[in-house]
Image (cartoon, coloured by chain):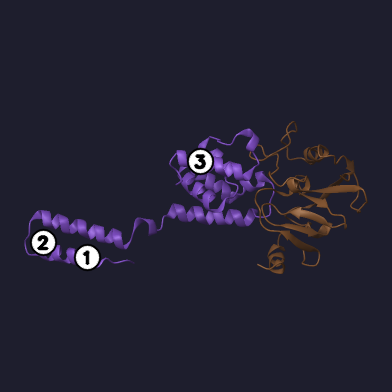
Chain colours: A purple, B brown
């Protein structure tokens, strides 16, 4: 956990002042400062998100169980993959981030969830081009960072 | 990971595979699969999936049947059914099917009689024909030949 000495000193000072009968504004300020301190020490980005944990676990299971398969159908019908599709639209940013970092055959899931397909017919099966088309789509929708 | 270690890790899916009946030839590459590799294509992932997310030769039905795969290789000139022997002047591909009859895998024969396979998005290996028999790919259902190019 991180700590910021400046925030800590200001927080203690305001707490001490408010404790001896300071204005309501200083009490509010002390409360807000405590929240700032808490967010600084334990940022939202490091908090465990159960949905993200579930996605990671399912994605790992899917990769492990389909790593030798050529059948796009079998890869997509894998129970872990279907469970990710079942997560619906909330899975899209996680799928796109995984696609960006690790690649993988996410195209069936992306199409099934979004009901869109940015891949032009001549590029179907060209993994590099499909990946690029879906990442551009995700960036346009604000679902994955450029 | 050393190839021997990888083979050990693969043996639950490929019980016949050993470091003696196979050898690795290229690293992980998800850009193409075994069906494409056997057809001589390393730019596309081939599969007749109903969602249309993979390449399949235009004009052929997107069906996961042995007949559809035989027709796909037929377009590449592999029109004759044959055995697994190595023959001068002929190139061969083997198509594997699972117990349910659905195609799972394809391999291309090398001049020394071994076979070259791409393992899904994973590595390429060379192997004896029976080395990949097992729960993952099933067994060879048909071998097709064409005149060597």
Q: Disc 2 marks which residue?
A: A18
Q: For residue A109, which quarter of the picture?
A: top right
User: Which tag is nearer the camera, tag 3 or tag 2?
Assistant: 3
Q: Is the Cβ of the residue at disc 1 closer than 8 Å to that at disc 3?
A: no
Q: Chain of mark 2?
A: A
Answer whether labels 2 and 1 touch (C-beta < 8 Å): no
Judging by the rendered image, the residue that carries numbered circle 1 is A6
**Residue A119 in picture, x, y percent from top left:** 58, 36
In the figure, is residue B65 to the left or right of A48?
A: right
Q: CA distance from mark 1 to mark 3?
A: 42 Å
Q: Secondary structure at mark 3?
A: helix
Q: Which residue is mark 3?
A: A136
* In this rendering, position of residue A43 left or right of residue A12: right
Could you tell me how far apart the alpha carbons at marks 3 and 2 are, in whole angstroms? 52 Å
- The correct choice, above or below, for A48 with respect to A1 in the image is above
Q: Secondary structure at mark 1?
A: helix
- Crowding around mark 3 (Cα neighbors within 10 Å: few <14, some 14 to 19, many 20+) is some
Q: Is residue A135 above or below residue A32?
A: above
Q: What SS does tag 2 mark?
A: helix
């Amino acid at each position: 956990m991180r700590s910021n000495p400046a925030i800590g000193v200001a927080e203690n000072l305001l707490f001490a002042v408010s404790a001896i009968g300071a204005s309501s504004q200083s009490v509010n300020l002390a409360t807000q400062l405590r929240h700032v301190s808490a967010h600084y020490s334990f940022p939202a980005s490091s908090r465990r998100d159960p949905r993200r944990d579930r996605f990671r676990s399912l994605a790992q299971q899917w990769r492990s169980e389909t790593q030798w398969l050529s059948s796009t159908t079998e890869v997509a019908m894998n129970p872990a993959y279907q469970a990710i599709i079942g997560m619906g639209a909330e899975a899209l940013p996680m799928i796109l981030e995984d696609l960006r970092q690790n690649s993988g055959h996410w195209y069936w899931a992306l199409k099934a969830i979004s009901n869109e397909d940015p891949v032009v017919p001549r590029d179907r099966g060209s993994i590099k081009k499909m990946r690029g088309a879906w990442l551009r789509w995700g960036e346009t929708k604000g679902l994955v960072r450029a | 990971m050393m190839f021997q270690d990888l083979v050990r890790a693969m043996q639950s899916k490929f019980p016949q595979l050993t470091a003696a009946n196979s050898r690795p030839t290229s690293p992980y590459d998800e850009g193409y699969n075994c069906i494409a590799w056997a057809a001589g294509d390393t730019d596309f992932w081939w599969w007749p999936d109903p969602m249309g997310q993979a390449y399949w030769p235009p004009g052929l039905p997107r069906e996961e049947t042995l007949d559809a795969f035989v027709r796909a290789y037929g377009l590449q000139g592999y029109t004759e059914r044959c055995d697994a022997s190595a023959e001068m002047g002929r190139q061969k591909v083997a198509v594997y099917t699972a117990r349910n009859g659905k195609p799972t895998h394809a391999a291309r024969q090398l001049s020394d009689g071994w076979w070259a396979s791409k393992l899904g998005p994973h590595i390429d290996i060379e192997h004896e024909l029976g080395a990949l028999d097992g729960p993952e790919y099933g067994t060879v259902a048909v071998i097709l030949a064409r005149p060597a190019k």
